[in-house]
Amino acid sequence: MPPMDRRQVQAWLDRYVEAWRTNDPEQIGALFTDDAVYRYRPYDEARNAVRGLSPIVENWLEEQDPPGSWEAHYEPFAVDGDRAVATGTSRYLASAKGPARTYHNAFLLRFGPDGRCAEFTEYYMLEE
């Protein structure tokens, strides 16, 4: 497969949001390589990095956000070969769990030859 381009990265990000929306294990699994690493909090990788496709899917499904409780949009900021940086926002709507809150996100992505993500590192900041 040739290097990733912006269109391919955007398509992957759109599938990421859809997998989050549906919490479908097959859709989640289709995003990542078998040996992928997903870093939720890169400042504490020992406790917050998930390694391998099955553990990523299992971890993703542990704390599901109910459909309609959030909205998100991400887009490529930079793409270079098999690596990309994406930015966007995740907004949780007001609910019995608390007030609305918006997170600004940056994702560091490395893709495998088949277009699935081999490394995903997530940074986020709560909007005040």
Image (tube, grey):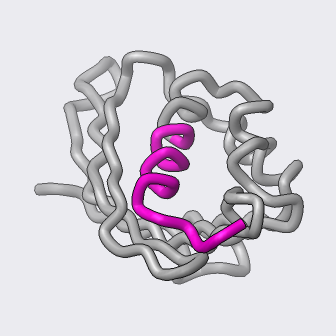
Residue at 88% from the left image edge and 59% from the top image edge: 34
Residue 48 seen in render: no
The percent position of residue 52, horizontal first and vertical second, equals 86, 62
Q: Is residue 124 above or below residue 66?
A: below
* Residue lying at the far front of the rendered structure: 2
Residue at 32% from the left image edge and 18% from the top image edge: 96
Instruction: Tell me which corner region of the image, top left, top right, bottom left or bottom right, holds residue 119.
Output: bottom right
Closer to us: 100 or 28: 28
Q: Is residue 115 above or below residue 110?
A: above
Residue at 22% from the left image edge and 41% from the top image edge: 101
Closer to us: 111 or 41: 111
Residue 4 sits inside the magenta stretch: yes
Disc tally is 0
Instruction: Tell me which corner region of the image, top left, top right, bottom left or bottom right, holds residue 92.
Output: top left
Closer to us: 95 or 24: 24
> Quick one: quadrant of the C terminus?
bottom left
The percent position of residue 125, horizontal first and vertical second, equals 28, 64
Magenta stretch bounds = 1-16
Residue 85 sits inside the magenta stretch: no
The percent position of residue 45, horizontal first and vertical second, equals 65, 79
SS assignment for the magenta stretch, majority: helix
Residue at 41% from the left image edge and 72% from the top image edge: 85
> Quick one: quadrant of the N terminus?
bottom right
Q: Is residue 43 above or below residue 77?
A: below
The percent position of residue 91, horizontal first and vertical second, equals 27, 38
Residue 123 seen in render: yes
* Residue lying at the far left of the rendered structure: 128
